[in-house]
Image (cartoon, rainbow, N blue to C red):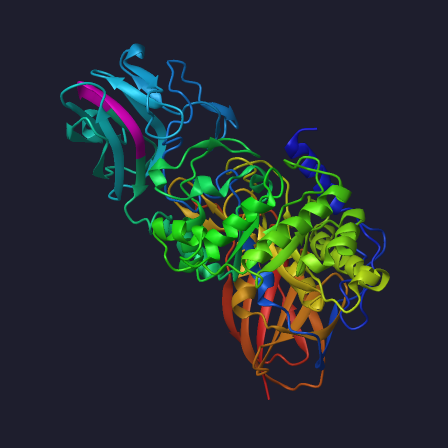
Amino acid sequence: MKLLSLIISIGLLACLPQNTVLAAENATPNAASEGSGSPAPQPSITLDAGKISEPMSVNIYSQFIEHLGRCIYGGIWAEMLEDRKFYFPITPEYRPYRSLRDSPFPVVGASPWQIIGPASSVSMSKEKPFVGRHTPLIQNGGGIRQLDLGVVQGKTYVGNAWLKTAGNGSAAAEVTLNWGEGDTTRQSLKLKGIGGKYRRFEFKFSAGATTDKASLEFRVNAGSVLLGTLSLMPADNVEGFRADTLALLRDLQAPIYRWPGGNFVSGYDWRDGVGDRDRRPPRTNPAWTGVEHNDYGMHEFIRFCQLVKAEPWITVNTGFGDAYSAAAQLEYCNGSTDTAGGRLRAKNGSPKPFAVKYWGIGNEMWGRWQLGYMQLEHYVLKQNWVVDKMREVDPSIICIASGDIGNWSTGLLKSCSDHMNFIAEHFYCQTRPELAAHVRQIPDNIRRKADWHRKARQDLPELKGKDIRISMTEWNYWYGPHVFGELGTRYFLKDALGIAAGVHEYARQSDIIGSAFYAQTVNVIGAIKTSRRNAAFETTGLVLKLYRQHFGEIPVATKTEGLLDAQAAWSRDRKTLTMGVVNPTLQEVRVPLSLANVKLKGSGTRWQIAGSDPMAYNDPDQAPKVAIEEQRVTGIRDQITLAPCSVTVFALEVE
């Protein structure tokens, strides 16, 4: 079975309806739904503010980024050029796209560089290549160009090229940004003084129009030139990161980022992603499609986490990787400069240790699609071997095993419980025709995972006296067309309702779920989507931003009747009672509110995400159709009013 088909099948299986037992004090909505044949009870919410649960970890708002599709390149990272290090040979046959050919973001499967001038003027030299296997050799009168770049009128773009002559004497070239067809719709810059050693030439352009059909050309005007690499970024990039995406990521306030995968990690060699960025070798993506430039490696990930004020989580390769590589990776990150790894890190520009404390041990090693997949009885040996070697380097690290409820998680818990601090679980859900049923998939699956692990604690003697909690390292909806490139699915208002209900369920399961990582952050199945020129929150991203900023941390006993999903939580200082409510119907509803052990002033703030169309969505190149609306409210004591198809968070002042 093809990789994507198998993963989608796993997601479908994970989201089949489950028979679950609801906790008496924290009940989820009644199972009756639209079209089910039995009417739902009238909606109501009952809170007992004196009955609280263990504080919900803020780490449930964490995020997952992987080298897949346009998550890193085309999303987080500002580089505009595909295959800038020329992994694919440039040939006269210009057929760059492998799949999604008719979409705005096709997948590159051959060189995206088109030859300008005689076909014979461009060849690939394998003699001492600048990086990778070969370097383009361009003769006088020839050149290359890349199409379909997005530029904004008046915006500045910066780039660079590593160049040297291929023979004796000097050479000359020029680089051109085109935003139209005529001579007045381009800006060209001369690159003079190209000599016998590679030299980095920098250039800057100002676009004269807004278009997604701009191109960059490189032409040789004298002599012959070896072109090591090319780069083009918006000038407002932040240390190589896309400024517009970075601003949204800061708003998201995710406390931890998990990286680099995902399936990608099982074929990834972390050593490829350190050192001089222009000299890092390009590869094919080992798990997905396209070229892995290795521009975004260890140092870039750590700097990214610093810029968004998040903790780094690194997953080690237990697919094609081994314990010694994992231990070396840990030493590189956390070792002092007295260690070999620490000295190499310092040589690469970071003398201070990264102090990474969260380490994922492999990814989905239970899946037959995974590179290096092995049977359970063999993998438990590898899990323990890897962790033992890593703890020899740094015994303080927090290790998260890659679980999957059933035989796999049972085997890990029985044989590896001394070699993990948390156990990871994943689930993805598809679409359902009925709105309430579509929404309920997310909380139902969170509860299903939590219930299984509670029972395991009762059944397995190996867990006696241990508190191994769940880290839901991937969770989301996954369906629909790939609008934003490889696996670049679009999310709708109805998906936002499900993600909000998921946050409620994490609050209900605060005693056993220690963290959760929405997958993935940018593009792909992400909370943020980018075009070539703009970035915007998905509907699901708006929910995560809203709850992270305004929902409480101490869960309050909450009972809900009808189709609603509600959960209350005290703020950390116990001065504000917050409540999130999902209305998965197309009607406005007035909901009786019954309170115990708290007295409201009747005033507060309400944040709402709502609309009449469950299929409403945001697009980065359009004005937002779905937004967070904030309003001061008064008179709230025994009733609330909810908009149709809505997520609402209340922050209520108490006496």
Q: Is residue 17 left or right of residue 311?
A: right
Q: Quadrant of residue 302?
A: bottom left
**Horizontal arrangement in the rendering, residue 394 relative to residue 54 (left or right):** left
Asked whether residue 588 is in view, the answer is: no
Q: Main secondary structure of the magenta part?
A: strand
Q: Is residue 64 magenta?
A: no
Lateral position of residue 440 relative to residue 266, left or right: right
Residue 158 image position (x, y, % from top left): 26, 41
- Residue 227 is one of the magenta-drawn residues: yes
Nearer the observer, 406 or 350: 350
User: Which of 275/403 is in front?
Assistant: 275
Instruction: Please determine whether, in this image, residue 95 is positioned above or below residue 70.
Output: above
Q: Which residues are magenta?
A: 219-230
Horizontal side of residue 1 vs 269, given as left or right: right
Residue at position x 13%, y 21% in the image: 169
For the N terminus, the quadrant is top right
- Which of the pair 413/452 is nearer the observer? 413
The residue sitting at 23% across, 31% down in the picture is 198
Q: Residue at x 58, y 62 (%)?
A: 395
Q: Quadrant of the C terminus?
A: bottom right
Q: Position of residue 559 (x, y in %)?
A: 76, 71
Residue 62 point in image, percent of width and height: 56, 58
Residue located 36% across and 37% down the image: 80
Judge whether 394 appears above or below 244 on screen: below
In the image, residue 528 lies at what x, y percent?
Answer: 49, 49
User: Compared with residue 132, is residue 51 higher up or lower down, i.e. above or below?
Assistant: below
Residue 537 visible from this viewpoint: yes
